[in-house]
Image (cartoon, helix red, strand yellow):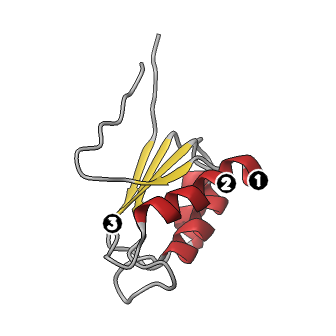
Amino acid sequence: MVVTIVLLVFVLVTYVTSVMLVKYLKKRIHSLRTDALRPDRSSSTHFGLPKALEEVRKIQPRRTLFTGMMHLMDHDNVNEYLAKLMETEGLDVQLSYDGLCVPVTL
């Protein structure tokens, strides 16, 4: 049996082109890792939380972990907000943290 797990990692991105999006949407993305630097807006080099969530909604991965947050991101409050997206939109999204272990079952 061949098992393919598609892991998509966006680092230091500020936009996803339509060509990239079409390519990724052809596959069911198992896990997405991308930055979400600020709670309010993107910077010139990183997604902010609103733009990162916009891309997650387009790609629809099974699970998303945001990385590279700055001090303005209140980890507990933002994760509480993100947990509600599972109930309202079916999106499994959370902020990562130092030492996070991600189990993978093959």
Where residue 84 is drawn, which disc sits there? 2
Q: Secondary structure at mark 3?
A: loop
Crowding near pointer 1: few (<14 within 10 Å), some, many (20+)?
Answer: few
Residue type at mark 3 is Val
Residue identifier under label 1? 88
Q: Nearer the viewer, residue 5 or 103?
A: 103
Residue 62, percent from left and from top: 58, 41
- Regarding residue 27, the answer to whether it shows in the image is yes
Residue 91 shown left or right of residue 64 in the figure: right
When asked about the image quadrant of residue 37, the answer is bottom left
User: Which residue is located at x 44 percent, y 76 percent?
Assistant: 47
Residue 44 shown left or right of residue 86 in the figure: left
Q: Mark 2 and mark 1 in contact (Cβ < 8 Å)?
A: yes
Residue type at mark 2 is Lys
Mark toward the start of the polypeptide (3 vs 2): 3
Crowding near pointer 2: few (<14 within 10 Å), some, many (20+)?
Answer: some
Q: Is residue 11 above or below residue 38?
A: above
Residue 12, percent from left and from top: 32, 73
Residue 95, percent from left and from top: 43, 57
Where residue 11 is drawn, which disc sits there? 3
Q: Mark 2 and mark 3 in contact (Cβ < 8 Å)?
A: no
